[in-house]
Image (spheres, grey):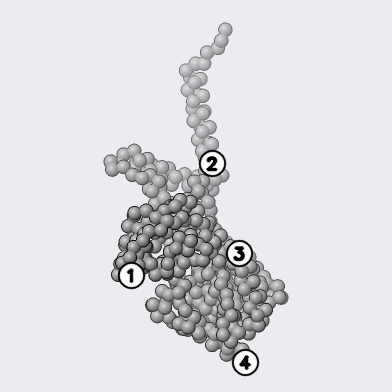
Amino acid sequence: MKRRFSTLTLIIACVLSFLLAGLCITGIFVIKYGGMDSFPYASKFAAIYNAIDSDFVGGADMEKVSDAAYGAMIDAIDDRWSYYMTAEQYEEYKQYQNNSYTGIGVTIGKDEDSGLFRVLTVLEDSPAQEAGVNVGELMCAIDGEDLKDMTSSQIKELISGKTGKSFELKLRTDDGTERTVTIEAEVIRSNPVEYEMLDGAVGYVRIKNFESDSGDEIIAAVDDLVSQGAKGIVFDVRNNPGGLLSELLKALDHILPEGDIFVSADKEGNERVKTSDASCVKLPMTVLINENSYSAAEFFAAALSEYDWAKLVGGNTTGKARSQVTFELTDGSAIHISTNSYLTPKRVDLAETGGLVPDVAVSLGDEDEEKLESGLLEHSEDGQLSAAVEEINTLIDK
């Protein structure tokens, strides 16, 4: 005869199941999120999310609501170097780290009279060059969508959305002539380092960022200039937002003599020190800096200065002495958050000192600053570069 479960037995079984489920949830929070302290906040978020999703009379884009909440959490820690990225933004960030971007190969600048963006440069062998886009033309519309009064970020996002697809770009010249070209956005490789020999055998190395491959590119540029007979080198890290520690260390190790070149400290104050070997480049050097020389760029200048390996020329830097780690989340989004402070070789915290002060202070006018940012400032018009070269010549003559 089959045994039947009593009602009491079923109730006990259900209670035990709920308790087991609760223990499992508790275990997940303890293991995944560091403890039950997180549980009330997660529950509160879920309650607010459900209230909006279920009861808000107007309807809402819940993905947009969630992204806003995640971003606000990072904003609330009051650290300008930490931020949240949506899945789409994180994909763009990873492209940037690889010194590539999705686009058509042009740089653009706002034309105040028309409210449109003017093509300032066209990259060689880019989709824009192949389509016949010319410098000076105004970008009017993309697939019939008017670009007037859009921001550069909005235009970039619009073009990125066309990746792998042909679209129509409407252009206009200053005499009012309009034409439409068919073009396709693609992933474009951007070289992080440019260099050349200036008059007087002074080498010039512009470092746009310290992302992927920049360390090897810097080394190759320096070695080539030395082989060409450079008597001194100007490094330009103006408007350089920084990048990867590994790339920075490659460059510093090649240029500087034996000694400490990087010091970082975690939240408990534990230090980690990176050193350089004895091999180095012995030439008079200067480093061009400004308020937009951040992170690895600022540290590059600081290290060369503290070793008395280079004079700093230009404007004051901001003082960023925090390194960040990117944590990818389960849905492809990510947070970029400060996890360590870093110090110069002489253990100076640039965040506390307010940044670097140049040995030779030279400012640029607003128009020249705009040209510098867009890559259109000619060497002959660049007062900061002229001062850096002059300083090199002074060092050579000593």
Query: Which residue bears the numbered disc 3?
Result: 213
- Residue at position x 49%, y 30% from top? 18
Locate residue 85, reporting x and y percent: 46, 54
Nearest to the eye among marks 1 and 3: give it. 1
Q: Is residue 227 visible?
A: yes
Q: Earlier in the sequence, mark 1 or mark 4?
A: 1
The 10 Å Cα crowd at callout 3, few under 14, some 14 to 19, many 20 or more, is some
Q: Secondary structure at mark 1?
A: loop
Give the residue type at disc 4.
Lys
Viewer-proximal residue among 389 and 376: 376
Q: Position of residue 183 (x, y in %)?
A: 44, 56
Q: Quadrant of residue 368?
A: bottom left
Would residue 72 be visible to someone looking at this image?
no
- Asked if the residue at tag 2 contacts the one at tag 1, i.e. Cβ–Cβ closer than 8 Å, the answer is no
Instruction: Measure the alpha-carbon separation of dots 3 and 2.
Output: 40 Å
| Foreground tag (4 vs 3) | 3
**Quarter the N terminus occupies:** top right
Name which residue lies at 50% across and 53% down. Answer: 91
Task: Name the residue carrying label 2.
Answer: 28
> First in sequence: mark 1 or mark 3?
1
Label 4 to label 3, Cα distance in Å?
A: 35 Å
The residues bearing labels 1 and 4 have C-alpha atoms spaced at a distance of 52 Å
Q: Amino acid at mark 1?
A: Asp
Please report contact status of discs 4 and 3: CB closer than 8 Å, yes or no: no
The residue where tag 1 is placed is: 174
Specify the label residue 398 is tagged with.
Answer: 4
Nearest the camera: 85 or 386?
A: 386
User: Along the horizontal axis of the image, is 157 left or right of 16?
Assistant: left
Q: Are marks 1 and 4 in contact (CB under 8 Å)?
A: no
Mark 3, mark 2: which one is toward the viewer? 3
Q: How far, Cα to Cα, is label 1 from label 2?
A: 63 Å
Amino acid type of the residue tagged 3 in the rendering: Asp
